[in-house]
Image: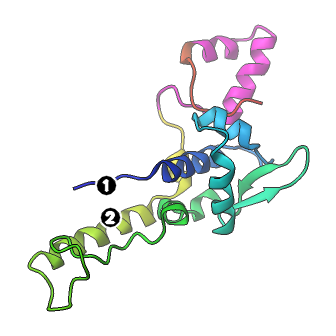
Amino acid sequence: MRLELTRRGDYAVRAMLALARNPDDDPVSVRRIAAAMAIPVQVLPRVMTDLHRAGLVEAVAGRTGGYRLARAADRISLLAVVEAIEGDSRHTTCVLRGGPCGRDGQCDVHAVFSAAQAAMLTSLADASLATLSAPRDGPAERIEERRGAKADRRHGGAAGQRQADLGEGVALET
């Protein structure tokens, strides 16, 4: 059984996590998101357009423009992000026959796979960007930590050493 996102779905999730980690409400450029999350910069604008159409991000035009979350990260689910790019996640084809289940009655495994699908969708719906983007122990850092470390590094402070100790994490450069 396969459960994986398309590349565009993967890029959308990573871009949304980058925006969720943005400590202020300033728009983040496509280039900065792409660089921070290792996403090809030529693909990301189309992904961001789909996220904008779905109402998940706001687009800000202009020289200092970019994207920001359309609402609080705790009000955006992983399911909403995935479905904005991948479409409706509910499978309507029979796992045994490949066509609609129900033309001649439900197949023998319909109830089990239907329950598994419902559990997966519930799990994705319950996972908010705020929860997923929360700091964890390890090299990934929040944007404000990088900003502070960058400023201290310029002045030879302890945060600069902390940044060096942590190594490169997934965060946006200022």
Magenta segment includes 129: no
Residue placed farthest to the bottom in the image?
104
- Asked if residue 14 is positioned above or below residue 70 in the image, the reply reads above
Q: Main SS of the magenta segment? A: helix
Task: Tell me how far mark 1 sits from mark 2, CA to CA.
Answer: 10 Å
Circle 2 residues within 10 Å: few <14, some 14–19, many ≥20? some
Q: Is residue 81 left or right of residue 95?
A: right
Circle 1 residues within 10 Å: few <14, some 14–19, many ≥20? few
Residue 123 image-quadrant placement: bottom left
Magenta segment includes 160: yes
Nearest to N terminus: mark 1 or mark 2 = 1
Residue placed farthest to the top in the image?
156
| Label 2 element class | helix
Please provide the residue range marked out in magenta: 137-164
- Asked if residue 26 is positioned above or below residue 101 in the image, the reply reads above
- Asked if residue 157 is positioned above or below residue 92 in the image, the reply reads above
Q: Nearer the viewer, residue 137 or 44?
A: 44
Tag 2 residue:
120
Q: Which mark is residue 3?
A: 1
Q: Nearer the viewer, mark 1 or mark 2?
A: 1
The residue at 88%/44% (across/down) is 64
The residue at 67%/68% (across/down) is 53
Tell me which amino acid carries mark 2.
Answer: Met
> Do the residues under discs 1 and 2 have CB atoms within 8 angstroms?
yes
Question: Residue 138: x, y in percent?
Answer: 47, 27
Q: Is residue 25 left or right of residue 172?
A: right
Tell me which amino acid carries mark 1.
Answer: Leu
Residue placed farthest to the right in the image?
63
